[in-house]
Amino acid sequence: MRIIAGSKRRLRLKTVDGTDTRPTTDRIKETLFNMLQNEIPGCYFLDLFAGSGQIGLEAASRGAKYVVLAEHAKKAADCIRSNILTTKSEQECRLLQMDVIAALRSLEGKYKFDLVFMDPPYKSGLEQQVFAYLKTSSLLAEDALLIVESAFNTDFSYLKEAGFTIEKEKKYKTNAHIFIRKEHAAKGEESI
């Protein structure tokens, strides 16, 4: 696993030992960041359920102004710390080793995030808790884009009630990226 592009290109990243995390493959990561290339420079980026931190660190390498990574598991958080040091990203990255909802609460009033990426454990329902929290939160910029990496059969029917809408989906062989905005900021639905 490595940083694909930007100022820290080609730097190798550590992964978390064991099966508790599923790192996004370099190929899927490259596809995702190609889709986000115009949104990354200068953005505030939030990486939830950050695992090894590779998504947030890729965003930092590609010009995100500031990246916050939230990860509760100690082994994964230790891996993120190591990867932040390896990539010399201490100035633009902050790790919160805590439950994702606690992390969101701790960020209130401090930042407005333009991009939020989350890769929760599949079939855990944790993404629904995040959207329920964000419904009344001040953490999102007006036109914030949220991306969920999910299993194909993940139920997103609750989004409308939470005030969000799916803008587009990108399906891969084994999973998908779901692109979501607040309903008032949605620019129309499309499928990729």
Image (cartoon, rainbow, N blue to C red):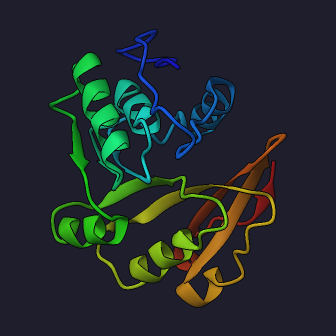
Foreground residue, 87 or 18?
A: 18
Q: From the viewer's perspective, is residue 106 above or below residue 29?
A: below
Residue at the spot 34% in from the left edge and 71% down from the top edge: 101
148 in relation to 137, above or below: above
> In front: 189, or 87?
87
Residue in view at x 69 percent, y 75 percent: 156
Percent from the top left, x then y, of residue 5?
48, 17
The spot of residue 59 in percent (x, y) is 41, 34
In this figure, what is the number of numbered marks?
0
* Residue at figure coordinates x 27%, y 26% from the top left: 82
| Rendered location of residue 34, percent (x, y) | 62, 31
Out of 96 and 10, give the one closest to the viewer.
96
Image location (x, y in percent) of residue 181:
56, 67
Asked if residue 41 lies left or right of residue 32, the reply is: left
Q: Residue furthest bottom?
A: 161
Which residue, as the protein is rendered here, is positioned at the far top? 10
The picture quadrant where one finds residue 43 is top left
Q: Quadrant of residue 190?
A: bottom right
Q: Is residue 6 above or below residue 45?
A: above
